[in-house]
Structures are given as C-alpha cells and as structure tokens.
Amino acid sequence: MSATDVDGAKNRLDEAKKLLGGIIDQMDSGMTAMIVTFADTPQVVQEFTSNRRLLRERLKTFSRRFGNRFERRFGTRRRPRKPKPDAHPGG
C-alpha cells in the first residue's frame, strides 16, 4: 500500500482512505460499516457502526505498518520467487 503509482495521492493507502471516506459520506442513516486492516493478520479498527463521524475518525487512526513478519524477523524484504521451469515441456 506504500506504492506511489496513484495519481494525486502520496500512496495507495492514502488513496484507499480517501475513497473510503467518500463511501462513509454516502452512507444512509441506518447503514452500518466496519473498518478492518490487513497485513500479516486482520485487525478490526472499528466494529460495525452506523456512526459516520466515528468511522471517519477511525479511518484517520491507522497507517501502513512498515514491514511484515518476515522483514521484522530477518531484516530484509522477501524477494519474489522465480517461476520454476516447466518439468514437462509439451504436455
């Protein structure tokens, strides 16, 4: 979510938060929503509520966690695996 390939936003997380803010603003009375973040494990930021003010406040409270569990343990980013050559070319 820290990639900077989104026009008009610092990163993808900022863009996602902006879009979610718009969805919260469009909620009708009686509608409920909750906010959950995902990294290594899901974390509930806000339980289901119809309180749009509370949802907007909670939307501001989280940011990208730097590094996943692998990075914290080994101090490096995991490199994507190279695809294995096909063991059975032609079928």
Image: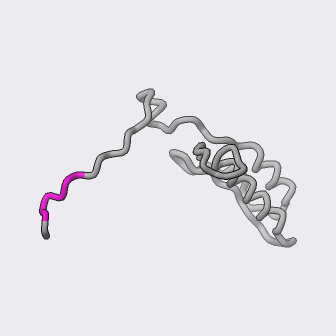
Colouring chosen for the image of the structure: one colour
Query: Viewed as shown, does residue 91 lie left or right of 71?
Result: left
Question: Is residue 90 shown left or right of residue 32?
Answer: left
Which residue is outermost to the front? 7
* Count of number-bearing discs: 0
Residue 49 in the image: state x and y as whole percent.
78, 61
x 60%, y 43%: residue: 2
Which residue does the image show at 45% across and 27% down from the upper left?
Answer: 75
Which residue: 77% across, 46% down? Answer: 60
Residue at point 68%, 52% (across, down): 7
29 relative position to 91: left or right:
right
Please say if 18 is above or below 26.
Answer: above
The C terminus - image quarter: bottom left
Q: Residue furthest top?
A: 75
Indicate the position of residue 66 as horizontal and vertical percent values: 57, 35
Across and down, in percent, residue 76 comes to: 43, 30
Which one is in front, 5 or 43?
Answer: 5
- Give the overall secondary structure of the magenta segment: loop
User: 33 and 4: which one is in front?
Assistant: 4
Region of the chain picked out in magenta, as a range: 84-89
Q: Is residue 83 located in the magenta-colored stretch of the structure?
A: no
Horizontal and vertical percent for residue 48?
73, 61
